[in-house]
Image (cartoon, helix red, strand yellow):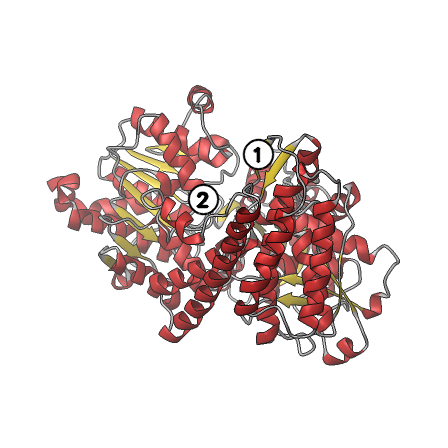
Amino acid sequence: MAFTDRVEFTKEMKKEGYTILAPNMAPIHFRLFENLFASYGYNVEILQTRGRQIVDEGLKYVHNDTCYPALLTIGQMMDALHSGKYDLHKTALIITQTGGGCRASNYIHLLRKALEKDGLSYIPVISLNMSGLEKNSGFKLTLPMIRKALGVLAYGDLLMLLHNQTRPYEKEAGASRKLVDDWTKKLTDMFAKEKGYSAKEMETILPQIAEDFANVPVTGEKKVRVGVVGEIYVKYSPIGNNDLEEFLFSQNCETMVPGLLGFMLFKVDNRMEDIKLFGGSKAKFEVVKILFDYLVGIESHVIRAVEHANTVSNRFTVPSSYAHLKKLITGVIGYGCKMGEGWLLTAEMMERLDHPEADMKIIHIAGTNGKGSTAAFVSSILHAAGFVVGRFTSPHLIRFTERIVVDGEEISKEDVIRLGERVLALPMKQETTMFDLCLGMAVLYFKEKKCDFVVLETGLGGAKDSTAGLSVVPEVCAFTNIGFDHTAILGNTIEEIAAEKAGILKKGTHAVLGIMDEKAADVIKKQAEILDVPITNVDNLLTKISTYEIPLNGVFQRANATLAVGVVETLFNNHCGYLGDNFLSKKEEIIRQGLAETKWPGRMEVLSEKPYVLADGAHNPQGVEALFNSLKNMFPDEKFVFLVGVMADKDYRAMMRTMYPLADTFLCATVDTSRSLQADELCQNLLEDGMSAVVSGDLLDGIQKAIALGEEKGERIIIFGSLYFIGEVKAIFEGGSIHLPEYE
């Protein structure tokens, strides 16, 4: 069975009483959910296992830099399946799938991959979602079930809040826990009788719960109050936070944990914001608005219940409303900015460095593929025009210094050390990533070199990217093609990904759109319209560029070169004072020269003519499709020997299926990084899909095998995959350790 196949949870499985295993996120809330599902005939079991073995189990299937909650949830479920406790042919799994940019939307795919790896792909995985992402005939969310689930959030939040504020002070140990257990049973009984979940009923029941906790005898001592915030799963789950609440209690502390209702309100409110910013039907907005208003009403009942408790025993902290918390961010962060705080880190870093970027003229480039090539073309043209040009790109192929370049010259190792020490010494409030540090070094270096222009490539996305945190408005924001990559972070649709990329736009800039999917272009155009940003399309330049000499191989490089010319011409048309009369009189000559002198390694780069070896950093489905088309155009009717190394979080099966019609053989290698897919696993997957594949051994061995096989079959060798992989390949070729056959 192919990995893309999905085993549905059927009505028959429900009738047969399949055990449905679910990870435990929030103990109080999920006990109520467990009982709620039972009332609808679902045999759901919330897993209670924890310990180091869960982490170890998760590491077998999920890379440790993917997402810690993913590692835990998948580890917990796989551990349960391996425990021998369950009949695996009558067991199903359930996991939430929210959609949008959160990685949690992809847990379900990682889980299915884990099942497939262990030969358990027959076990159905149920997607718990309200977005229609997946449907199962045997498991349906009905309106009454959803209303009860929302009631669970309210009751769970109140029980958690009151328990946390009572337990540290109770005179009789276990009194507050007993109330939690008693009310869990009462609420379960009510739900089974179709009672207790309406807003009107909650208005009565919630104060009763609060009053019971207010009547628990307590001591009068004061204890340290500790707030717990952070990633939603780790914040609530004992397995995720190593029983943090229990530890704090043992240390004589009172724990304050925000409720799940606030998170739900944010998600729903954010969806309304998406519709307003990026488009959507009025009807959909109204439906979401109804849900939002309903949640606000429930939230108000919870708040009033705590206020009622204070009329009995004035010792409880009343939670703030979502509306109040939303007001607190006004003027601090734009509400349409989402998913990540990378740009906040950059903003703080620039402030502490006294804003070295303040006077820079920046060209900001976002997109899925082609960002680096476009940056190289733009930089080369501007350099040919006589300007000092800084370029910041990532990742590097061989040397870290490749990331920071001025006029084609890499930053020196000495400057890296000097500027790195300066950036590392900053008293940052938030932990910085390597990308943040590199960006800080680059900006300082570009200021020292008095760059006329700075070309910045986004690292990931746009809105959340560190490069978006610079205070200066870019002269031009350029967008390359947009496709599916980093979906766990950026979104599951072209529109969602495009919306993230469009996040680099700022009022006062100028947008230049490359050749891309119409849906993606529409999203960027809409955001540009909101910000009153003028747009340039480059479609009319494509024919003109076809006459220019471009040293970079691949038909897709014409599109990248076209975008680069569009960027430079936009600079001229809107800021002719920057470029001067010299550029005006020699524009055509300068553009031709700049394009012809562009260098960008690792993109359809010929490493050897005899034997013919070409390397390309095609690391996602769109990149592989572009490579496929270029190879067909350059070498019609030829087959190739492919050497491949990919990351485990990429859709590598789709990539290989795309390239398969041109493949004689796939040699599978392992990239030297923690995110790498192991060569033997890649090989096994390809064999299962009916392709010819072998494990290459170490990389040097793999290259030698590919060359030998290519010589034997009279075929060219194509090496593609992760940019890190291509960097390793180039280092081997440049190091002279490859034995090449002798040709006459």
Q: Determine the residue located farthest toward the right in the rendered image.
A: 84
Between residue 535 and residue 546, name the one nearer to us: 535
Q: Determine the residue located farthest toward the front in the rendered image.
A: 312
Instruction: Tell me, for residue 573, which label it has, or none.
Output: none
Measuring from the top left, give residue 93's x and y in whole percent: 73, 64
Residue in the image at 39% along x and 70% along y? 285
User: Which residue is labeled 1 in the image?
Assistant: 225
Between residue 670 and residue 137, name the one nearer to us: 137
Q: Is residue 87 left or right of residue 687?
A: right
Front: mark 2 or 1: 1
Residue in the image at 22% along x and 35% along y? 386
Dividing the picture into quadrants, the one containing residue 256 is top right
Residue 693 in view: no
> Which image quarter is the C terminus in?
top right
Q: Label 2 is placed on what type of residue?
A: Gly
Dividing the picture into quadrants, the one containing residue 134 is bottom right
Residue in the image at 59% along x and 68% along y? 197
Q: Is residue 485 left or right of residue 115?
A: left
Residue 605 in view: yes
Q: Is residue 207 above or below residue 422?
A: below
Q: Label 1 is placed on what type of residue?
A: Arg
| Sequence-wise first label, 2 or 1 | 1
> Which image quarter is the N terminus in?
bottom right
Between residue 321 and residue 624, name the one nearer to us: 321
Q: Secondary structure at mark 1?
A: strand
Measuring from the top left, give residue 269's x and y in whole percent: 43, 60
Instruction: Tell me, for residue 459, which label it has, or none.
Output: 2
Q: Is residue 474 left or right of residue 230?
A: left
Residue in the image at 51% along x and 39% along y? 397
* Residue at mark 2 to residue at mark 1: CA–CA distance: 39 Å
